[in-house]
Image: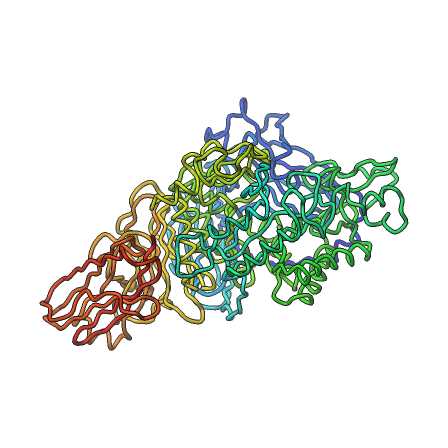
Amino acid sequence: MMRSYPVLIIFFGLSLFSSLAKAQEVSILFEVNMSYQIESQQFNASEEFVDVAGSFNGWGETLIQLSDEDLDSVYSVEVDGFSPGQEIAYKFRINGEWNDREEFPGAGNDRLYTVKADSNHIYVWYNDERPPTGPPEADFTTNSTQVFTNSLIQFQNRSAGKIDSVTWFFESGTPEVSNEQNPQVRYSETGSFDVQLLAYGEAENDTLLVENYITVTERETEETKWWNETVFYEIFVRSFYDSDGDGIGDFNGLTEKLDYLNDGDPNTYDDLGISGIWLMPIHESPSYHGYDVINYRSINPDYGTMEDFKNFLDAAHERGIKVIIDYVMNHTSTEHPWFEKSAAGDAHFRDFYRWSETNPGYSGPWGQQVWHQRNGDYYYGLFWGGMPDLNYENPAVEDSMFTISDYWINKIGIDGFRQDAVLYIDEDGPVLKNTEETFQFWQDFNTNLKAANPDAFAVGEAWESTDIAIKYMTEDRLDYVFEFDLAQAILNGVNNETAAPIISQMQKVYDEYPFLQYGTFLTNHDQNRVMNVLGEDVEKAKLAASLYLTLPGIPYIYYGEEIGMLGQKPDPDIRLPMQWSDEANAGFSENQPWRSINSNYTDFNVEVMEENENSLLNHYKKLIHIRNEYSDLSIGEYEAGISSEESLFTFIRQNQYAGSPIMIAVNLSADSIKNASSVFSKSYFEYGPSNAGYYETDVLIGDYKSEEEFRFSFAKNESQQLVQNINLAPYSTKIILVQPVLTSKEFDKTINSFQLHQNYPNPFNPTTTISFYLPSAQTVKLNIFDITGRLVATLVEGKMNAGNHSHSFDAFSLSSGVYFYQLETNSFTSVKKMTLIK
């Protein structure tokens, strides 16, 4: 049979729901059919259970279990507390666990639903899988349907019934026809294109044709901002370094450790290389974490004085480090003077918070109590009773908080804010997040911030699916938000040794956000640490770092991530003291720290790991310094390669204004990859003869295995795209700078005159070998220069015979930095860069 339907795109304005926001709460009946899982023995109905996890229950923090009372394999539960117009994301799980048995493992694959005023009934098949019996029923999906040219789309076959094989047809796609279950397709032309899937069974076939399913447009050149060229480091001051022996980190200790983060000298490579710092809350607060503020203009006395903070700020700025601070605008502490006066009935401050004479009764997005009693009345506090929410319906509150923003930007001189809990700023009755009033608030805040300093910025914690989070930085709201779905996709891909979830979510993010305007990270202070998520596997931690520090976006490193610190909830245990050495208290303090040190500190600390060339710490250093040195990795465009291996992720980054392409290849598997192919569009490689191109390469990270890898060769396939054969060791990364030697005609004339040259290793300490090939006897000069142009060594000078030549360069007496070597022959002169790291 044949089914065909056009794609309908319906846009609901937020204003549509403004009148519904005041309506009575509604419920949703969730039903999931588990027949396929039971029949295929993936689910034991007598011993296991199904739950629903979503944005409304903290993604499973509050367990909502379904039941099958009539034993028909359909599990159901009715959940109260929703509001008309509320947008939710959710998926079903087995046994309340995130262990890849949940629906659509990975980020960016959530089910989405907009709550209606009545009759909210959700009925789905678990994982959209139906028993493999009965006639075929073709079905498919993908993460992105509106993309830019050369985007790589990961299609997912979700067909049901007994199916022997499938055939895909992609109008104007590459490939145009595929028999794979979940093919990758690139679109190089603009327009709207059909996708057709044929599902073949023994007796029947089914065809699904979706007209104009993929829309492809050209990306316009867009300007980037200073923060796009910054690598940020998130610091919990209490846990970073204690300078006075009271067991609590402080600003003076942070200042002492700035050279570890960035010593201010771009010619040295022994620092981490970050250029931005995000400080978790630094204001006076009754709690250890500081997210319930007593005084927004103060400094937490545990951390020092305002003078100490200013000294730190000056020292950071001298090193070229930007500093942003947490600004918790959603709520205060109950000990804040505003709340104390409000609770006491002060006429001016009463409406600084939301009060009700009776309990309105509704609960929060994850089922929590949000109305709390004080003096016979009820006040609204989303997170808990000690954090009452500010009432931004009162103009005096907004004015006060905007004035505080001006104070930190203009008088103190910070560079911007990390905005906490941006979803919840302005409620609309029982609609507690993502309201029209909240979007308007951030637009107003941004206007005020840019008036104070056009170069200041605000990044938001919009902990939602990509489709919702992106709303917070469009229409001149926040400058950008953190990309939670991409972080989860990277971790899932690394853990499961598959590139598909990363490719899919990365393309969605790259195509839908304004150019590069999103924050990338692995985990933060609210999540279990990376090493715990990755099973304490250092090689997997390196892979995860390689990915998010070379992919597009603005990277954030949670302190200690670079040395493999451990940490699992409760929250204080994911915010433990930094591990500086294997001495007592991990070198954090001379006395007992505010919280016990991690169990792995003797092996995983800065001092020990700095001495190990292959440590996780030194891997982070290499990645950050390469990102700083090559703008392609910070502000460059992105294109994923179509790879022949599930565990291989390849992509190109190239500065839209200048620079040569940088290719990144990551093997996510514990097995070697040999002679794998990866297909790119030809637009990134404009040079080379008609059938192949040869390029000089500089292996920035990773080993080359033979002389052949001095040549970076692309053979064009039948679609005139470029295919690169790739070899990678298990759990390894290769970052390659690709430089066209000459234009095509010049290349054809001279390819036999010389062979490309390379030094290895690069970076090196203290020796490296420079190799080159001469097709005939020639006069050769090989000189080494420092970054100022001063000649520091001559390795070769005179006539040399044809053949391969290698010369060792010993830099034992030289300091760390960038050096250049110049190779001159009768017909060829070239200068290349190398880095000495001691």
Taking depth in this image into account, of 293 and 433 the one nearest to the observer is 293
Q: Is residue 651 left or right of residue 73?
A: left
Taking depth in this image into account, of 293 and 133 the one nearest to the observer is 293
- Whole-percent x, y for residue 507 in the image: 48, 56
The answer to whether one can see residue 468 in this image is no
Q: Residue at x 67, y 44 (%)?
A: 301
The answer to whether one can see residue 439 in this image is yes
Q: Which residue is outermost to the top?
A: 46
**Image: 412 above or below 353:** below
- Whole-percent x, y for residue 333 in the image: 74, 42
Q: Is residue 439 left or right of residue 144?
A: right
- Whole-percent x, y for residue 427 in the image: 76, 49
**Image: 91 above or below 696:** above
Taking depth in this image into account, of 179 and 462 the one nearest to the observer is 462
Give the colour scheme of this rendering.
Answer: rainbow
Q: Is residue 621 left or right of residue 409?
A: left
- Whole-percent x, y for residue 203 in the image: 41, 42
Q: Is residue 440 left or right of residue 725?
A: right
Question: For residue 186, what is the image quadrant?
Answer: bottom left
**Image: 400 above or below 106:** below
Taking depth in this image into account, of 689 and 659 the one nearest to the observer is 659
- Looking at the rendered structure, the number of numbered marks drawn on it comes to 0
